[in-house]
Image: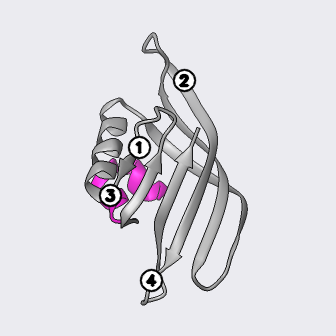
C-alpha cells in the first residue's frame, strides 16, 4: 500500500480492494468499490499528500479473514497550506482470495 500511495498511483491502490469494499475516511464520505476508492486516493494525491507510511500495531485472523491495525503518517499541508505531518490510526480487514492473496474488504482511518 505504501509503495502505490507514494507513487501517486490511485489505480494501483484501488486494485487492493474488493469490488464491494468500503473505505471509511475521516471525512465521513464513504467510498464504496474500486472506482470510488480510486477517486478518493486521486483527490488525496491532488491535495499534495505524500510519504505515506504504515507501522503495524496488531494483526490476526484466520485462513479467510485477516485484520490489522496500524499507525499511519504522511506529509501534507495544514489549513493555511504550510507543510505538516498528518497521522492517525488505521484498521484494515482483508479477505483471502482463491489464489492466496489478500484484498481489502474494509479500511478505515482517522
Taking the spot 61% from the left edge, 49% from the top edge, the residue there is 90
x%, y% of residue 44? 37, 37
Of tags 2 and 3, which is closer to the observer? 3
Cα–Cα gap, marks 2 and 4: 38 Å
Q: Secondary structure at mark 1?
A: loop
Residue 84 lies in quadrant? top right
Q: Which sits in the foreground, 80 or 62?
A: 62
Q: Which residues are magenta?
A: 1-15
Q: Secondary structure at mark 3?
A: loop
x%, y% of residue 41? 35, 45
Q: Which mark is residue 97?
A: 4
Of the numbered discs 1 and 2, the one sitting upstream in the chain is 1
Q: Which mark is residue 30?
A: 1
Indicate yes or no whether the magenta region holds residue 89: no
Give neighbour class at mark 1: few <14, some 14-19, many 20+ (Cα, 10 Å).
Answer: some
Check the image and report above or below for 45 versus 69: above
Amino acid at each position: 500500500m505504501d509503495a502505490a500511495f507514494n507513487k501517486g498511483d490511485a489505480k494501483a491502490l484501488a486494485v487492493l480492494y474488493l469490488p464491494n469494499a468500503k473505505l471509511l475516511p475521516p471525512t465521513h464520505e464513504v467510498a464504496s468499490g474500486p472506482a470510488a476508492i480510486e477517486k478518493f486516493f486521486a483527490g488525496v494525491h491532488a491535495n499534495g499528500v505524500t510519504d505515506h507510511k504504515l507501522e503495524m500495531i496488531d494483526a490476526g485472523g484466520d485462513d479467510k479473514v485477516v485484520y490489522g491495525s496500524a499507525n499511519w503518517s504522511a506529509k501534507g499541508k495544514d489549513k493555511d497550506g504550510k507543510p505538516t505531518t498528518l497521522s492517525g490510526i488505521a484498521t484494515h480487514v482483508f479477505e483471502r482470495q482463491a489464489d492466496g492473496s489478500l484484498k481489502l474488504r474494509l479500511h478505515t482511518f482517522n
